[in-house]
Image (cartoon, coloured by chain):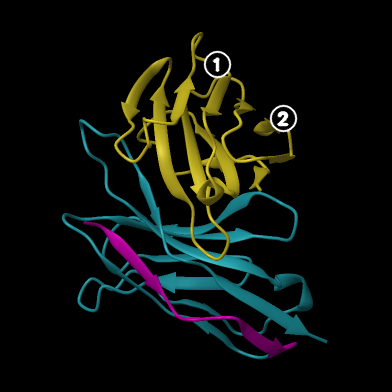
Chain colours: A cyan, B yellow
């Protein structure tokens, strides 16, 4: 079945450090890939997406490139801020005519950024 | 526009009791999802509705979980009877259509079964 594997957390960084959170996937077919973010006490929010190979999603200084050859979608940010502290989830979706559009999530990576 | 609303936000029950969660999606959104998020894990889809019809309930434990969306708007998820392993956050999400890329999530209901 479809699955997503994220790097083990938690991740602790100092402000302005470079961030990478690794994400790899296994899927039958051609998935769309997503990063969701969950701030403390809030619901999940879509951070960025990529719908086909070599697409780069970007938002709020975060980027991720859909690499079909390595089945990866690593999240990066050049300079993190304290306000980026949250849990980050990598997810995939494959559209199926008979079963809709289920999101399959990774286990999440807790990021803490210290001043 | 108003986001996805869920209630209650927190619930504590004893095992073998029953519990129900309510979700009101964003106005006009045809597709509604219920996810279960166990502590330390990513959300797992329980059931997907398109209007008032079920599209995917393959991961719903049907012996104890049920869900309905009778008028194609708000939805209720029920657990009867609850087990300790049902302790989790139950998330509701909605999207304009089943093929939409973005799902909008509510704040969730945190259930603790003792």
Q: In the image, residue B7 lies at what x, y percent?
A: 71, 31
> In which quarter of the view is residue A27 placed?
bottom left
Q: Residues within 10 Å of mark 1 (few under 14, many from 20)?
A: some
Quarter holding the N terminus of chain A is: bottom left
* Magenta-span inclusion, residue A42: no
User: What residue did someone put label 1 on?
Assistant: B73
- CA distance for labels 1 and 2: 14 Å
Which of the two residues, A115 or B65, is positioned nearer the viewer here? B65
Which of the two residues, B28 or B69, is positioned nearer the viewer here? B69
Residue beneath the point at 58% across and 42% down: B90
**What secondary structure is marked by label 1?**
loop
Q: In the image, residue A26 lies at what x, y percent?
A: 24, 66
Q: Residue furthest right?
A: A115
Location of residue B11 with respect to A47 vertically, above or below: above
**What secondary structure is marked by label 2?**
loop
- Chain for mark 1? B
Location of residue B5 with respect to B11 vertically, above or below: above
Q: Which range of residues does the magenta coloring cover?
A: A1-16
User: What residue did someone put label 2 on?
Assistant: B2
* Magenta-span inclusion, residue A3: yes
- Chain for mark 2? B
Residue beneath the point at 74% across and 79% down: A81
Query: Do the residues under discs 1 and 2 have CB atoms within 8 angstroms?
Result: no
Residue beneath the point at 60% across and 81% down: A10
> In the image, is B105 to the left or to the right of A102?
right
Point out the tag, 1 or 2, that comes first from the N-terminus: 2
């Amino acid at each position: 079945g479809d699955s997503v594997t994220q790097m083990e957390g938690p991740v602790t960084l100092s402000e302005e450090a470079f961030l990478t959170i690794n994400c790899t996937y296994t899927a039958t077919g051609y998935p769309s890939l997503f990063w969701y973010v969950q701030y403390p006490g809030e619901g999940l929010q879509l951070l960025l997406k990529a719908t086909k190979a070599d697409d780069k999603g970007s938002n709020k200084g975060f980027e991720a490139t859909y690499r079909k050859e390595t089945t990866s979608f690593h999240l990066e940010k050049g300079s993190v801020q304290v306000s980026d502290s949250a849990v980050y989830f990598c997810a995939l979706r494959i559209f199926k005519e008979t079963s809709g559009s289920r999101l399959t999530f990774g286990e999440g990576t807790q990021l803490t950024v210290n001043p | 526009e108003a986001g996805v609303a869920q209630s209650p936000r927190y619930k504590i029950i004893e095992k073998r009791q029953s519990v129900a969660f309510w979700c009101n999606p964003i106005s006009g959104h045809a597709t509604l999802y219920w996810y279960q998020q166990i502590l330390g894990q990513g959300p797992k889809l329980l059931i997907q509705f398109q209007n008032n019809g079920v599209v995917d309930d393959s991961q719903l434990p049907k012996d104890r979980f049920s869900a309905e969306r009778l008028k194609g708007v708000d939805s209720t998820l029920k657990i009867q009877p609850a087990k300790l392993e049902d302790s989790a956050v139950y998330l509701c999400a909605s999207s304009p259509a089943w093929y939409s890329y973005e799902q909008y999530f509510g704040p969730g209901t945190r259930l603790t079964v003792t």
